[in-house]
Amino acid sequence: MKNNVKVFRVHADLTQHQLAEKVGVTRQTISLIEKGKYNPTLKLCLEICYAVNKTLDEIFWVDQEES
Amino acid sequence: MKVIIDERLVIKNLKNIRFAFAFQTLALVGIVIYDGITKGFNNITNNPIWLVLILTSVILGYLNLSISVDSYENEKRIRKMPYYLLVLCCVAAGVIFGLLTKITSNSSLADSIIIGAVIFLCFLGTFSFGYFLIKKRSKDDEE
């Protein structure tokens, strides 16, 4: 599913590897999330939000038409 | 070996295990059938692999009961049913099977009582498990 993980990760000045280490997953998982090819659990979504200091809305909200 | 904590990989791992389980089951069924063809189908039950297959299906059945309970539509009817009625139904099943054994074969009274008791216990075990699972779920819902 489409999301803004990549945008806010770059804003937070983190590489995929650093973000992956922070949230406790592999770099490939972060890559797949950014590409919209893997839907993370709510727990992982929250971990990503904490890591980049953003809210769930900002990173994962998509309008109904877009989803 | 490193413990996998990545949720995506854990799910992938579970899918791989499911595939391996399906392959293993097919292989075991194949061995049992081959054994049946070469040594006669009456000997199938003597094979320990047969016991493994039966026990696996029993375990799978019991584990899947919680899934069935979640998707069971007539839950409210079951929830209102008193437990003693369920026990009576199981007793009835045991008695029917015991009588059928006595009537249809030349087995002794002791044999038919044993078969009736086993059927009663099997029914009681399964239905009690399902009944208390539904009770527990409905209690969780109310809380």
Image (cartoon, grey):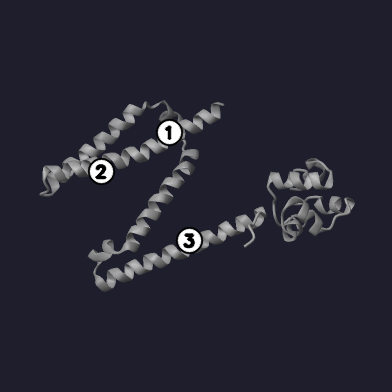
> Residue A64 appears at what percent x and percent y?
75, 43
Horizontal side, residue B77 vs residue B115: left or right? right
Q: What is the chain letter for disc 2?
A: B
The quarter of the displayed image where residue B6 is located = bottom right
Residue B132: mark = 1
> Residue A45 appears at what percent x and percent y?
74, 46
Q: Amino acid at mark 2?
A: Val
Residue B106: mark = none
Marks 2/3: CA–CA distance: 30 Å
Q: Which residue is mark 2?
A: B118
Q: Secondary structure at mark 3?
A: helix
- Residue at the spot 24% in from the left edge and 39% down from the top edge: B94
Q: Earlier in the sequence, mark 2 or mark 3?
A: 3
Cβ atoms at labels 1 and 2 below 8 Å apart: no
Q: Amino acid at mark 3?
A: Phe
Q: Which residue is mark 3?
A: B21
Marks 1 and 2 belong to one chain: yes
* Whether residue A61 is situated above or below residue A25 in the rendered picture: above
- Residue at the spot 22% in from the left edge and 41% down from the top edge: B116
The quarter of the displayed image where residue A58 is located = top right
Marks 1 and 3 belong to one chain: yes
* Whether residue B139 is situated above or below residue B22 in the rendered picture: above
Marks 1/2: CA–CA distance: 21 Å
Mark 3 neighbour density, 10 Å: few (under 14) some (14–19) many (20 or more):
few
The quarter of the displayed image where residue B49 is located = bottom left
Mark 1 neighbour density, 10 Å: few (under 14) some (14–19) many (20 or more):
few
Q: What is the chain letter for disc 3?
A: B
- Residue at the spot 81% in from the left edge and 41% down from the top edge: A55
Mark 2 neighbour density, 10 Å: few (under 14) some (14–19) many (20 or more):
some
> Which residue ends up furthest to the front in the rendered image?
B1
Q: Secondary structure at mark 1?
A: helix
State which quarter of the image contains the C terminus of chain B: top right
